[in-house]
Amino acid sequence: MVLGSAAKQAEQLRKDGNLYFKKDRFGAAIDAYTEAITLCPNVPVYWTNRALCHRKRNDWLKVEEDCRRAIQLDHSSVKAHYMLGLALLKKQELDEGVKELQKALDLGRGANPKGYMVDEIWQELAKAKYLLWEHASSKRSWELQSLKEACETALREKHFLDDSQPEGFLDEASISHMKQLEVLRQVFRKAGEADTPGEVPDYLCCKITLDIFRDPVITPSGVTYERAVILDHLEKVGKFDPITREPLDQSQLVPNLAIKEAVQEYLDKHGWAYKVD
């Protein structure tokens, strides 16, 4: 394809900007990308490149502006959705930020499931979802504690212990009162269990990394692995199943939708499992 004069100049400016960026000269890179945008405003990569410079400078408002423009030009821009998600998280717009990160992750997995960005995006998404869970968990914990105390107070008022009873003597009303208090405490302990960190079930974890699945795939042998991990194994170690040692090719890997759905259901109920080291 023959580029026009403006397009050629814009491309050269993009290359100049990339060179400045590699040398950490972000101001000069921004100037170069801005000139490229002036010449060819409908090229999304110029906007995402400039947004990346703004990100390096922690200018999140400009990151958001450039990414929104890039998305208008290319709805499938992984970098634009990713950096927009980060910018929204910086503004404490957690729900919207998570949506953009999830969009970036879905697009990234479709384009290059082994790409470094997929793992980076998942890490940021997991941190954001953990933060959402933490906020919601703290609120639930406070509400449960307040309700528990109110219920205990109501029970005590209903079954007031008579101080005139001889020491060591408990009548039926007092025994019933204590039983009700214990049942009440058990109910509230049960209610808080989902927010208590524990161990993720083995069947939801990759047999190689032992981490909870992100993008599970199943082999013809019936073993499920994390996609990026098994692809890395096939490329660097050999074309065989690491557990069964059966011959295995990338084309034989199939998304394990049942496990993926089970993982998501588990994470929805146990947000603490999003925590990453």
Image (cartoon, rainbow, N blue to C red):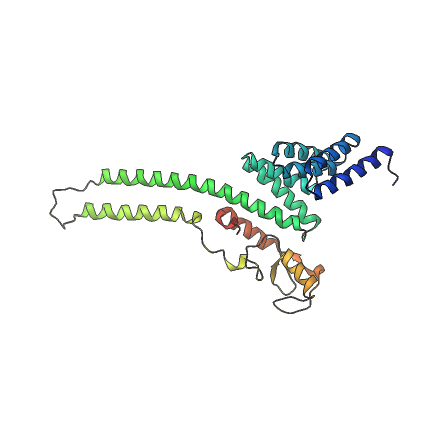
Q: Which residue is most to the right?
A: 2
Q: Nearer the viewer, residue 115 or 245?
A: 115
Q: Nearer the viewer, residue 65 or 143?
A: 65
Q: What residue is rendered at 78% in x and 41% in y?
A: 15
User: On the image, which quarter does residue 76 sit in?
Assistant: top right
On the image, which quarter does residue 245 sit in? bottom right
Q: As drawn, which residue projects farthest toward the bottom?
A: 245
Where residue 262 sits: x, y (%)?
A: 55, 52
For the residue pair 6 and 211, the one nearer the viewer reads as: 6
The image shows residue 234 at horizontal and vertical percentages of 68, 62
Q: Is residue 108 left or right of residue 169?
A: right
Residue at (62% x, 46% y) in the render: 121
The residue at the point 64 percent across, 46 percent down is 105
> Horizontal placement of 176 versus 102: left or right?
left
Q: Residue at x 55, y 35 (%)?
A: 93
Depth check, front residue: 194 or 22: 22
- Residue 133 left/right relative to 151: right
**Which quadrant is home to the N terminus?**
top right
Image location (x, y in percent) of residue 164: 11, 42
Labels in figure, total: 0
Can I make out residue 93 in this image? yes
Can residue 41 be seen?
no
- Image coordinates of residue 170 in percent, x first then y, are 16, 49
